[in-house]
């Protein structure tokens, strides 16, 4: 059964611009568990909902957890933050979760090899007018000290 999935893998490209990170992550995790290969582009333009102070405090606490040489590592760059959030939605310690996690790729901007392909969006993850307080991943990574990508 696993052999036919190798030959007929479905590939999906998702534009993360103005999509809520948590909702995006759940959809991507479900599709990856079902065997699809997912590329997420424009991850620096994804949105975290909540007040700016709460978001910054929560992610700064995640960064400081552990010690210098060991402990849980939490990334600073946009593509790794999004990928780590998606990993939280997967059973990443089981074999099916590990395989699903390998099928997910995240990119800042749109790579040259994906520009001419069909890029989709997720309607249920779009930012609505009721979300008054939010922050982009790009702003968060600037605060955490990641290099600026110039986008």
Image: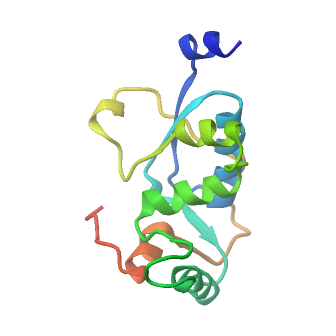
Is residue 90 placed above or below 57 in the rendered structure? Answer: above
Q: Residue at x 57, y 83 (%)?
A: 65
Q: Give residue 135's quadrant in the image.
A: bottom right
133 and 99: which one is in front?
Answer: 99
Q: Residue at x 62, y 53 (%)?
A: 86
Q: Position of residue 3 (x, y in %)?
A: 62, 11
Q: Position of residue 29 (x, y in %)?
A: 67, 44
Q: Quadrant of the C terminus?
A: bottom left
Q: Position of residue 112 (x, y in %)?
A: 27, 36
93 and 134: which one is in front?
Answer: 93
Q: Residue at x 25, y 65 (%)?
A: 150
Q: Give residue 68's quadrant in the image.
A: bottom left
Q: How many marks?
A: 0
Whether residue 126 is visible here, answered yes or no, is no
133 and 100: which one is in front?
Answer: 100
Is residue 85 placed above or below 118 in the rendered structure? Answer: below
72 and 135: which one is in front?
Answer: 72
**Which residue lies most toward the front here?**
69
Q: Quadrant of the N terminus?
A: top right
Q: Position of residue 110 (x, y in %)?
A: 35, 43
Tell whether 46 sits left or right of 129: left
Is residue 44 placed above or below 41 in the rendered structure? Answer: below
């Amino acid at each position: 059964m696993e052999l036919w999935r190798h030959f007929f893998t479905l590939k999906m490209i998702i534009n993360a611009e103005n999509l809520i990170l948590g909702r995006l992550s759940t959809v991507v995790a479900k599709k990856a568990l079902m065997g699809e290969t997912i590329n997420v582009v424009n991850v620096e333009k994804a949105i975290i909902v909540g007040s700016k102070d709460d978001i910054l405090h929560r992610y700064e606490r995640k960064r400081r957890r552990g010690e210098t040489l060991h402990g849980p590592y939490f990334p600073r760059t946009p593509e790794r933050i999004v990928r780590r959030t998606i990993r939280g939605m997967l059973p990443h310690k089981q074999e099916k979760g590990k395989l699903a996690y390998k099928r997910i790729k995240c990119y800042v901007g749109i790579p040259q090899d994906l520009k001419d392909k069909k890029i989709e969006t997720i309607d249920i993850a779009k930012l609505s007018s009721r979300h008054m307080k939010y922050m982009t991943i790009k702003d968060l990574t600037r605060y955490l000290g990641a290099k600026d990508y110039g986008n």
